[in-house]
Amino acid sequence: MSLVTDSPRLPCPVASDSFQRCLSPTCAATFDIGETHFRCPACGDLLDVVHDWNRLPVPSRLADFEKRWSTRNNPLDFSGVWRFRELLPFAPADRIVTIGEGQTLLQRADKVAEYVGLNPGGLSLQYEGMNPSGSFKDNGMTAAFTHARMVNASRVACASTGNTSAALAVYCSATDLGFRAIIFVGSGKIAYGKLAQALDHGALTIQIVGDFDDAMARVQQVADRLGVYLMNSVNPFRLEGQKTIIYRILEGLSWEVPDWIVVPGGNLGNSSAFGKALIELVHLGLIEHPPRLAVINAAGARTLDELVGKRSLSWLSGLPEMSKVDHYYGELDTGHVKASTIASAIEINRPVNLKKCLRALDFCQGVVSSASDQEIMDAKARVGAGGLGCEPASAAAVAGARRLVREGVIARSDRVVCILTGHQLKDPTATVAYHGTDQEQFDKILGSRGVQRAGFANRPIVVANELDDIIRAIALYSGERADA
Ligand code: F0G
């Protein structure tokens, strides 16, 4: 087998008023936008994409972006990411890779608000399941593929709990630009809907005997060794695209800032991107103050909650005490503790964007919480009954909001937006186990994780194939008389 390396990652200078900068204030090394690093070559810290706003044209009001609704036949104005392109201005227009991502919906959800404990009108759900690959990842993928195109990459890789890999596979197959997808997943660790997408869209799918954290470590080594372009959210261009979720939320609220944005936390790319978006919007005077941010872990993968909530890890102007992180990871290793939750999308113990998330929490007076698998599945059922379906990880946001209302952190009268990060059909196994009548299935999928009751189950009714029986069953279960 030959190990063919892609074109070497030589700096490819691109005329731009954006550049890359190391997150560490003691390093702060900068790199051209045309370089491909993923981590600072000088110190190993994360990189940011930085824009020289003094030299860039930015609309004076966010509402000016609405004009692009009338020019939707231009693919860049159609995209829910690139119609905000002045706020992620790193790419020449002719390099942009878009498949029409970001046509998402902010929906008022009164039934779910009642469940969460908020006043009517207090809760909106930002439904990112409407993206082409069914999750919020497309927002980031369009930006990272654009950068990959700028640097002439051809092979693109990621480790994934399923949605990043689905998005990667979709972008490779939907564009005719010669991109080839290589994805790393933990064997048995991704939901079937997502695995189906990777396979159907033709990605080279490497199933590692291990979990996401193992796959993430390996893909970084492989990217280094083979010069493959890395599409995980450690790639700062991904996060530029994910900033636009914030812009669309504000747009959905007529440019009013909500009190809270609640997001599930896994690898912490989304929360990091939200923080960067809000820092920039305040800096540019486009909003006066940020909303508060709540990041919700699954209880079985609660690194952020543990480190921030229990061990007081914080941003400290860019110099967080990373020894606390190392110490915690050491404890996980010694105790052979692996992430474990029904919300497989966020089954992650070593989030690569931890530091950037701390920045977001610092800027947005953020809080962190975690939700048990029981809370997640119950919240998921309430979200489904309220209109929009989501996968378990997304429901963590709703479960977390509910917990924070109960604890008095979020007030009943607050205006809250929860991000539904992924589509309901991504993980039908969990849904059917919850609602279904098969006890063995329930025990295997949910009971084994401590879920004890499906409190909001909508059980299917098994009936003989006889008309009278069917009519009787309908009457019995819908509260109507058979002869009515
Ligand atoms: N919700 C869903 C549906 C996800 O797929 C993910 C992450 C998250 C929430 C967490 O977002 O990582 O930005 O904190 N999924 C990644 C993947 C890890 O590989 O698909 P995050």
Image (spheres, helix red, strand yellow):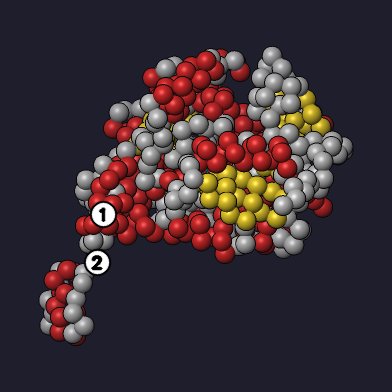
Along the line of sight, the residue nearer the viewer: 365 or 236: 236
Dot 2: few (<14), some (14–19), or many (≥20) neighbours within 10 Å?
Answer: few
Q: Nearer the viewer, mark 2 or mark 1?
A: 1
Dot 1: few (<14), some (14–19), or many (≥20) neighbours within 10 Å?
Answer: many
Quadrant where the C terminus sits is bottom left
x%, y% of residue 149?
78, 49
Give the quarter of the image for residue 287: top right
**SS type, badge 1:** helix
User: Which three-letter amino acid code belongs to the residue tagged 1?
Assistant: Phe
Give the quarter of the image for residue 242: top right
Instruction: Give residue 304's mark.
Output: none
x%, y% of residue 301?
41, 35
Instruction: Give residue 442's mark.
Output: 1
- The residue labelled by disc 2 is 460
Along the line of sight, the residue nearer the viewer: 463 or 291: 463
User: Which three-letter amino acid code belongs to the residue tagged 2?
Assistant: Pro
Q: Residue at x 52, y 32 (%)?
A: 351
Give the quarter of the image for residue 86: top right
The reply to whether the residue tagged 2 has its Cβ within 8 angstroms of ligand 1 is no
Residue lying at the far bottom in this picture: please name it: 467
Q: CA distance from mark 2 to mark 1?
A: 14 Å
Name which of mark 2 and mark 1 comes first in the sequence. Answer: 1
**SS type, badge 2:** loop
Q: Residue at x 35, y 50 (%)?
A: 380
Q: Seen in the image, is 125 located left or right of residue 446? A: right
Is residue 240 visible in the rendered image? The answer is no
